[in-house]
Amino acid sequence: MNSILKPNGKSNGSQTSSFGVGTRINHDSSKFYNSKIYAGSNNTYFAKDLENPIPQENINKVFCKSSEQMTELPDNSVHLMVTSPPYNVGKDYDKNLSMNEYRDLLTKVFKETYRVLIPGGRVCVNIANLGRKPYLPIHSYVIEDMQKLGFLMRGEVIWNKASSASQSFAWGSWLSATNPTLRDIHEYILIFSKDGFARKKPVARKPTITKEEFMEYTKSIWTFSAERASRIGHPAPFPIELPYRLIQLYTFEDEVILDPFVGSGTTCLAALKTKRRYVAYDNDQKYCELAGKRIEEYLQSQNTLFNQQKDTNNKVIPVYQSS
Ligand SMILES: C[S@@+](CC[C@H](N)C(=O)[O-])C[C@H]1O[C@@H](n2cnc3c(N)ncnc32)[C@H](O)[C@@H]1O
């Protein structure tokens, strides 16, 4: 990074240097973004300012159906999507799809997500890679497919599950170079935007992130424990810390968070805890009920006013009412 000196000798910010990076204060990065490696990339800064309301009867709902069609949600209405898709590795809800079929399912859901997301809205996909013979880099397929859909990549977080990662003793060849294998203790959170990177600050909605949280959550490696399946009653729940961090970092109070593969409802709990609203989908009745039960328990523990309604399938769903 080189300082740009004004004629009076005072610094006027900095430019990208050919010898790595240093301070980013008042940094002029136009030389870097005009270089050939960026040719053809969409680097729109401000997204269009466009937002449609979601009908009140569809807010704070878990819809028990496939998220391939989210007809309950208008175009340009959701501020953030956080999800962990089905793994397709033989969990009880998995369908044993081929890699192409699996990518097609995710592409359908994320295309629908693109439709419902506001311009400038963000999408965060928590995903792990699979196998060893060969290793299946699912995260790279998701990145490729999201970019084809038009999403702009913002970055990726390596979630270090550290000592809570399931203990694998699949060393390959023990203490020998014949075939030692890597034992993943991490997952990815892939982060994208629609239309442009920056959102205009909404007039009436406040950020809720603290300075300490902001400094920690903008780092690209996050370390916290995984959630225990047996504690939640779902085969693959993520810990509430994961959607909590993304909601705090990427949305303002009262905004709408979508999880199209919501499982046990963890994203809905994080949305309520941060005073946001949610819309969620799962196509397995027992997980919709589990999500509903966890949400109800949370609301009761908060003494929040809520009532219960029945959806078209006569399933009891919690409805959040702000007091
Ligand atoms: C990895 S789990 C999500 C777990 C969730 N993050 C949690 O904390 O509990 C994926 C979920 O996607 C659901 N699912 C699979 N295919 C679906 C589809 N087409 N539409 C909606 N949900 C689906 C499964 O039933 C499963 O609960």
Image (cartoon, rainbow, N blue to C red):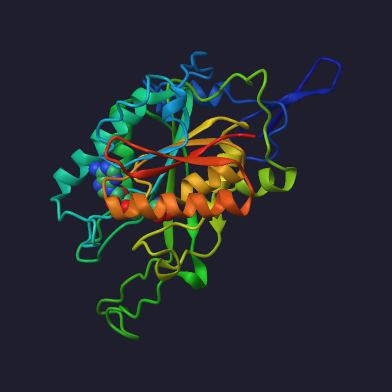
Q: Quadrant of the C terminus?
A: top right
Snapshot quadrant of residue 136: bottom left
Asked if residue 233 is positioned above or below residue 70 in the image, the reply reads below
Task: Residue 319 in the image: state x and y as whole percent.
Answer: 48, 38
Direction from residue 29 to residue 50 in the image, left or right: left
Asked if residue 157 is positioned above or below residue 238 in the image, the reply reads above
Task: Residue 15 in the image: state x and y as whole percent.
Answer: 65, 27
Snapshot quadrant of residue 174: bottom left
Asked if residue 163 is positioned above or below residue 85 in the image, the reply reads below
Direction from residue 146 to residue 49 in the image, left or right: right
Snapshot quadrant of residue 128: bottom left
Q: Residue at x 82, y 15 (%)?
A: 7
Task: Residue 203 in the image: state x and y as whole percent.
Answer: 67, 17
Q: Which residue is farthest bottom? A: 175
Direction from residue 122 to residue 182 in the image, left or right: left
Task: Residue 250 in the image: state x and y as whole percent.
Answer: 56, 35
Nearer to me, 142 or 241: 241
Nearer to me, 84 or 212: 84
Q: Residue at x 41, y 51 (%)?
A: 291
Asked if residue 294 is positioned above or below residue 113 in the image, the reply reads below
Work out whether residue 86 can be spotted.
Answer: no
Q: Quadrant of the N terminus?
A: top right
Q: Residue at x 25, y 64 (%)?
A: 131
Direction from residue 208 to residue 116 in the image, left or right: left
